[in-house]
Amino acid sequence: MHTLLLDAKQKGAVEKAAEILRNGGLVGMPTETVYGLAANALDGAAVAKIFKAKGRPQDNPLIVHVSGFGQIGRLVESVPERAEKLAEAYWPGPMTLVMKKSPLVPDIVSAGLPTVGIRFPSHPVARALITAAGVPIAAPSANRSGLPSTTTAQHVLRDMGGRIDAVLDGGPCGVGVESTIVLLTSDPPRLLRPGGITLAQLRAVLGRVDVDPAVLNPLPKGARALSPGMKYKHYSPKANVIILHGGEGDYVRYVNAHGGPGVCALCYSGEESLLRVPAVAYGGEKDYPAQARRLFDALRHLDDIGAQTVYARCPKPEGVGLAVYNRLMRAAGFEVVSVG
Ligand code: TXA
Ligand code: MG
């Protein structure tokens, strides 16, 4: 299959992508978080192609994207008041709400669960595409299963070229990590995956919000994941990522003492010049939004330069830093070495 590259700025590009979606095809779609692999959510056969193209396990449900709050009514059993409040505050934006699904949502979308995750993205190209398609859009991140999510159209092409009908290029993603997922069917509501909307922002609207243990810790063997995506090895480059816990001086000393063929660093901005191994910086130490924006791109870049072992700096699990921490810990398979 030839994959069409469509520039969202060109006249007719969004319409063309929408037509592909209406005809049951797959389109790489820019969103403010990461690129999505889009299909008509109401077309079970189209959704099945997503799982095949990604190599995604069948028991991992997809998020359904809408271009207006009014569209969620027919996708869910009922709209909880907590959903209205969160939507009012943070939609359109990087937040997914998990609610009881209606029979209209095919079982393949929810992977057999009684719930569905719904998101109203803020990216203007995503909104225009969903509106033009005229249907809700199922979309996981547009990467091969297990690899870091894609944040540029070029990365989508590299992972999915030849496997999908088109990629709509809307430029690099602004947030850079996937949406915050909130489970609204439990009391109190529960954070299943941290993202651009922070825990503090959720609590400001809802009061109490619990953090699912899978956000911070590896899932114990045999345990059931509330968010099935959390049980898979994830966001992993080919290289072996090891997080070094300690201050800048200790980090630099450790890395420089352990240099060698294939050894690289994933460091904070300004540390490159102190390191004697190839180093990729992904933002300032306290600049969590920059780290989120650049993390997946940096992990892919490290693979490109032939990294075998990556010694990484990892932020504190606070604010948007919690999302970065969550992704980086998974990329590292929770391997942390204390150097301080
Ligand atoms: O920002 C995002 O959320 C991106 C863009 C494209 O919108 N999408 C995304 O999709 O990250 P994906 O499929 O890569 O991750 C979705 C996560 C998975 O971990 C999945 O298990 C979880 O959401 N999920 C989806 N539906 C769920 C449900 N009904 N209950 C619990 N978890 C759910
Ligand atoms: Mg994903």
Image (tube, rainbow, N blue to C red):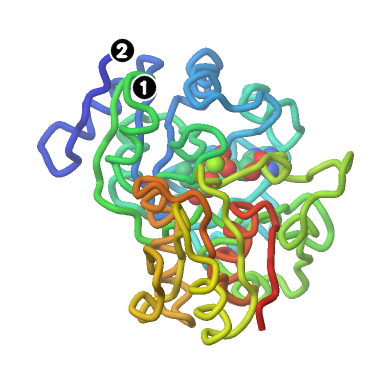
Whether residues under marks 2 and 1 lie with C-beta atoms below 8 angstroms apart, the answer is: yes
Which residue occupies 57% across, 55% down? 241
Residue 33 point in image, percent of width and height: 43, 54
The residue closer to the viewer here, 69 or 16, is: 16
Residue at the spot of label 1: 164
Given the image, on which type of amino acid does mark 1 rest?
Answer: Ile
Extreme residue in the left direction: 11
Label 2 secondary element: loop
Task: Estimate the spatial distance between the alpha carbons at disc 2 and disc 1, rounded to whole Å.
Answer: 7 Å
**Residue in the image at 84% along x and 59% along y:** 187
Whether residue 70 is visible: no
Q: Using residue 206 as the reference point, say whether residue 152 is left or right of it.
A: left
Residue type highlighted by circle 2: Met
Q: Is residue 253 visible?
A: yes
Q: Residue 13's quadrant in the figure?
A: top left
Q: Is residue 282 left or right of residue 210?
A: left
- Residue for badge 2: 1
Residue 179 higher or lower than 47, as above or below: below
As drawn, is 297 to the left or to the right of 153?
right
Q: How many marks?
A: 2
Measured as percent of width and height from the top left, residue 298 is found at: 40, 57
Q: Quadrant of ligand 1?
A: top right
Give 59 or 14, whichever is nearer the viewer.
59
- Residue 311 - label: none
Residue 327 position (above or below residue 35): below
Residue 258 locus on image (x, y percent): 54, 67
Observer-nearest residue: 221 or 48?
221
Local packing at callout 1 (Cα closer than 10 Å; few below 14, some 14-19, many 20+) is: many
Residue depicted at x 71% and y 28%: 59
62 vs 13, left or right, is right
* Rendering coords of residue 113 (x, y %): 75, 32
Q: Quadrant of the C terminus?
A: bottom right
